[in-house]
Image (cartoon, rainbow, N blue to C red):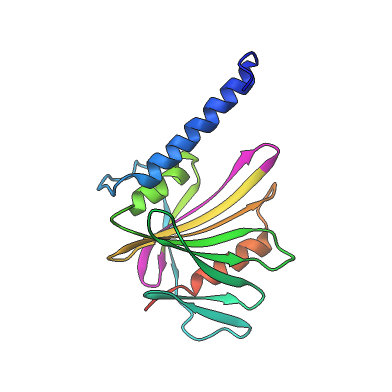
Amino acid sequence: MNLENPKLHIAGLVIVGLGLLAISIFSSSPSNKKSSNIPTIPIQEYKPEITATPGWSIYKGNGYSINYPLIMTVWENQISGGGTSLIFNPPKNLNFRMRLDIISKNRTSPESSSELFRVFKYQESDIQLSGRSAKKFTGSLKIKPQTKQETAVIFEDSINVYKMQLTYDAPTRNAEIDNLYEQIIKTFNML
C-alpha cells in the first residue's frame, strides 16, 4: 500500500474495519439484547404455498422445503465453521445472487444476523413466514462504481437461524428480480 497517498490509506483502513465488523457480527454468540428503537413496518404474512407450483421444483432440506422455478438450479454448500447454505443459481437472463443460510443458534442469533442490515439503515419490517415471525430488510449500498440492492428475510426455529438473502448490482430496484425473490420466499415451509 502506498502510504504517501492518504486516500488509499484511509480506504484500506475502512475496508479492514468493515471486514472486522462483519467478522465480529457473524461470529458473536447469540445475545438477548433488544434492538434499538428502529421503527418497523406492520406485519405482513407470507403463507407457504403447500402445493407444487407448475414449472417449479421443490427442494426439501433438513426440516424445511422451498420451491424454485425450473429455470434455476439449486445446490447445498457447507458453511465453514458450521451450517449450510442453499445457493440459488439464476436464469441466464437475470444477474443476481440468492442464498438461504441455515446456522445453528449456538453460533448466531437473529439479532446478530440482522445487525449489519441495521448498521446500513436498511428498511426493516416484521413479516410472518410459515407461521413464524421474521424480519425483512431492504436497502441499497453504494460501493463505487456500483450500487448493491439487497433484501434479506431472517427468522428462527428452535435450533437454527435462517437468512434468505438476495443481492444484485443495479442503480435502482429491479422489479423482475424482486418479484422472483418474493415468489420463492413465500414457498418456504417448515416441515
Q: Position of residue 95 (x, y in %)?
A: 69, 59
Residue at 36% x, 45% y: name it. 27
Instruction: Specify the farthest residue to the top.
Output: 4
Question: In this image, 176 relative to 157: left or right?
Answer: right
For the C terminus, the image quarter is bottom left
| In the image, residue 12 above or below residue 110 | above
Location of residue 41 by image quarter: bottom left
Magenta residues (range): 128-146
Viewer-proximal residue among 7 and 118: 7
Question: In this image, 158 relative to 184: left or right?
Answer: left
Mark yes or no: residue 10 visible. yes
For the N terminus, the image quarter is top right
Location of residue 3 by image quarter: top right
Q: Position of residue 23 (x, y in %)?
A: 42, 41
Task: Give the main secondary structure of the magenta stretch.
Answer: strand
Location of residue 25 by image quarter: top left
Residue at 55% x, 48% y: name it. 139
Mark yes or no: residue 38 visible. no
Q: Position of residue 48 (x, y in %)?
A: 45, 76
